[in-house]
Image: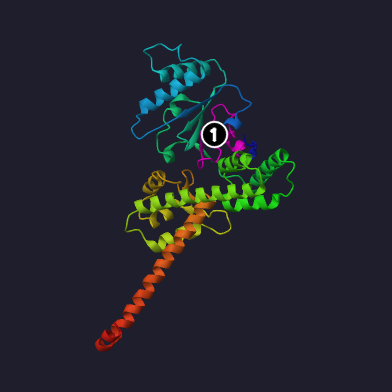
Amino acid sequence: MGRFIPREEVIKSITADRIQENPSTVLIIGNRGAGKSTAAISAFSEQQGVVYTELGISSQSSDRDIGSVWAAKVLGALGMQHTAPQEEDPLAVVRGALQEIKQGGKQRPVFIIDVNAQFVVVVSAAHTAAAVREPLCSLRVRTVEVGDLSETEATEYVKAAVSKWRAAHKAIVNLDETQLVEEVLSKCGTQALLLKQLCFDSWSACDTPSQMHDAIKAFANRDYTHAVAGLDGLLAAAPATASRAEQIEVLSKLAASDGKSAILDLGQVAAAFGVTRPEFVDLNLAVCLGAHPFTINPDTLQVRAASVVLQQAMLKQVEVWKAEEEKERKLYLWQKIVRKIPQKVRQGLL
C-alpha cells in the first residue's frame, strides 16, 4: 500500500460549504488515477453518516434504472437491503428515509458516488444523486478538480518510497535519491495512482537501484504507448476537414515544455479538430484504446493535456506533422523547378 498524502487544499474545496443548512452538490473531476475517490472519502473521514457507492453508467441506462440501482446500493451499504418492502422501489425507500431525517432536524447523510471512475459526486439529496447521468455541464453543482500531485507533494511521495526501499535493503547504500526523484517526475509525471504503482508496488520487487531505474523506464514506456494510442484514436475520429495548422498550434500550446500543461478554451480546441464543443468532449471520452488525451473542466470549459506523457506524445505528433509538411514543401519546389526545365533536357535527366 502506498503512503497517503493529505491534499489539504482539495479537501477544503470539497467541504467548503458543508456547515450550511443546504450544502451544494459537489462534482469532483479529474483524470483516472488522480485521486478523486480518495480525496472525497478523506474529506469526510471524521464525519458520521457518509455512504460511499460505486455506480456504473452506460448509454443504455435510463434515469429510472440509475436511480433505483444507486438506491439499492445505498441500502446495501447500510445493511438495509432486506428491510425494504419487496415490491417498493429502492429509490422511494431512500427518499422516504431522507424525508424523515429532514423533518426530524437531523443531519443529512453525505452520499459519495463514484461514477465509472470518471467523476465523483458528493450530494445530500437522493433526487440529485439519481440524476448523475445528465451532461456534466448542465448539472447545477459546485465543481472541484483533482489534478495531479504538485511537484512538492510528488517529491515527498517518491522520497517516502525511497526511504521504505532503503529500510528493506540496508546492505545497499549506493542509491542517489535526488536522481531517482528527478527521473520519476520528468519521465512519469506526478499522477497519484501511477506514482503509487511505480514507487511502492513495483519498487518493492526490486533488489538493486539498477532495477529501480529499469522499472521507471518500463512505466514511462508503457504510459507513452497508451498516450500515443489514445491520441491516435482521437485524431482518427476527427473529421478529415479539420485544419492541420490549427491542430499543430493547439497541440504545441498544450504540450508546453515547462512540464505544466497550458490551458486553452474548449471552443478553440474543438474548432481546431473541426467539431463543436460537445462533439469534442464526446471524442475525448470515446477513446477506447489508450489514455484520454485531454482533461476538460465542465465548469470552466477549459482544456489541458491529460498528463506529462500525453504532452510528450503531442510534441511527437507535431514533429511528425511538421516533417510531413516540410517534405511536401520540398516536393512542390522540386516539381516547380522540373516544370521549368525544357522537355528534352528533362528527358535526358530521367
- For image coordinates 39% across by 50% down, the residue present is 233
Q: Is residue 121 left or right of residue 210?
A: left
Q: Give the image's coloring scheme.
A: rainbow
Magenta part of the protein: which range? 10-39
Does the magenta run of residues contain 202?
no
Look at the image and tell me in which quarter the N terminus lies: top right
Q: Is residue 189 left or right of residue 343?
A: right
Asked if residue 306 can be seen in this view, the reply is no
Instruction: Work out whether residue 30 or residue 314 is closer to the camera in this orientation and state it.
Output: 314
- For image coordinates 68% across by 41% down, the residue present is 165
Look at the image and tell me in which quarter the C terminus lies: bottom left
Percent across and percent down for residue 331 are 35, 74
Q: Amino acid at mark 1?
A: Ser
Asked if residue 232 can be seen in this view, the reply is yes
Give the image quarter of residue 70. Answer: top left
In the rendered image, the vertical position of residue 37 relative to residue 268, given as above or below: above
Does the magenta run of residues contain 16?
yes
How many neighbours does mark 1 have within 10 angstroms: few (below 14), some (14-19), or many (20 or more)? many
Percent across and percent down for residue 99 are 48, 18
Instruction: Work out whether residue 126 or residue 220 is closer to the camera in this orientation and state it.
Output: 220
Residue carrying label 1: 37
- For image coordinates 58% across by 52% down, the residue present is 187
In the rendered image, the vertical position of residue 26 relative to residue 339, given as above or below: above
Percent across and percent down for residue 230 are 43, 49
Give the image quarter of residue 61. Answer: top left
Percent across and percent down for residue 328 are 36, 71
- For image coordinates 57% across by 51% down, the residue present is 217
Instruction: Work out whether residue 323 or residue 35 is closer to the camera in this orientation and state it.
Output: 323
